[in-house]
Image (tube, grey):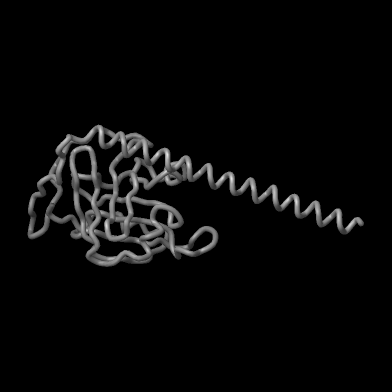
Amino acid sequence: MRARRWHLWIGSALFVTGAIALGWCVWVWHEAAVAQSQAKRWLRQQRPAHATASPAVMTRGHAAAPRVLIPKLHRGDVVAELDIPRLRVSVMVFEGDDAGILKIGAGHIAGTGLPLQGGNIGIAAHRDTFFRPLRFIRRGDVISLKARAGTSRFAVRDIEIVSPTDTKILAAAPGRDLTLVTCYPFFYVGSAPERFIVHAQRIAA
């Protein structure tokens, strides 16, 4: 009798734990979906009705970002919409890359470049949510960033795996106009030991 009660108690505890975990996952998904929808709506309202890709300046054979004055960004501000058509990736990018930001979208890494400005734009997202399709990315894939002032386009140039402490991947360098960062391996359980890096170069619209 005692054994049966013990089994019933364990079963009930597991059921309640599972229900709580499922509810938490649903809430997190809902929170992210709402944030993405609101950010996308806001960005579309801010952009000109007939906004097209901004003209790029050709510098030494490749497209360089036109200089655009962008107001100072604060944590949580909408930066851009990132699209990778071949992978069917579309995610809103917010300023900041802390846990709260990465729970609702992709995050612009502070201190890196911004769309339609110079420098290497650094964007991070979780490997098990918005950046999960990156495991299928390949050289030549086109990435677009739709910001308030216009759209920038990039082509994937190379992919590498680095340690979490390797910050050189965010440094400005020829051919590195956009860098995507996520954890690696993609199917690792727990805190992943490495980072999956995608470097892309700006291309003419």
Name the residue: 24% across, 48% down.
145
In the rendered view, would you say 49 is above or below 159?
A: above
* Image quadrant where residue 132 sits: bottom left
Q: Position of residue 131 (x, y in %)?
A: 38, 55
Q: Is residue 182 above or below residue 67?
A: below
Where is residue 50? Give x, y as percent.
Answer: 14, 38
Which quadrant of the rendered structure holds the N terminus?
Answer: bottom right
Q: Residue furthest right?
A: 1
Q: How many marks?
A: 0
In the image, 83: left or right of 106? left
Q: Nearer the viewer, residue 190 or 129?
A: 129
Q: Is residue 38 left or right of residue 17?
A: left
- Identify the residue shown where x is 8% and y is 60%: 61
Image quadrant where residue 105 sits: top left
The residue at the point 43 percent across, 44 percent down is: 98
Residue 191 % position (x, y)? 52, 58
Q: Residue 60 sits in which quadrant?
A: bottom left
Residue 146 in picture, x, y percent from top left? 24, 44
The residue positioned 48% from the left and 64% from the top of the image is 187
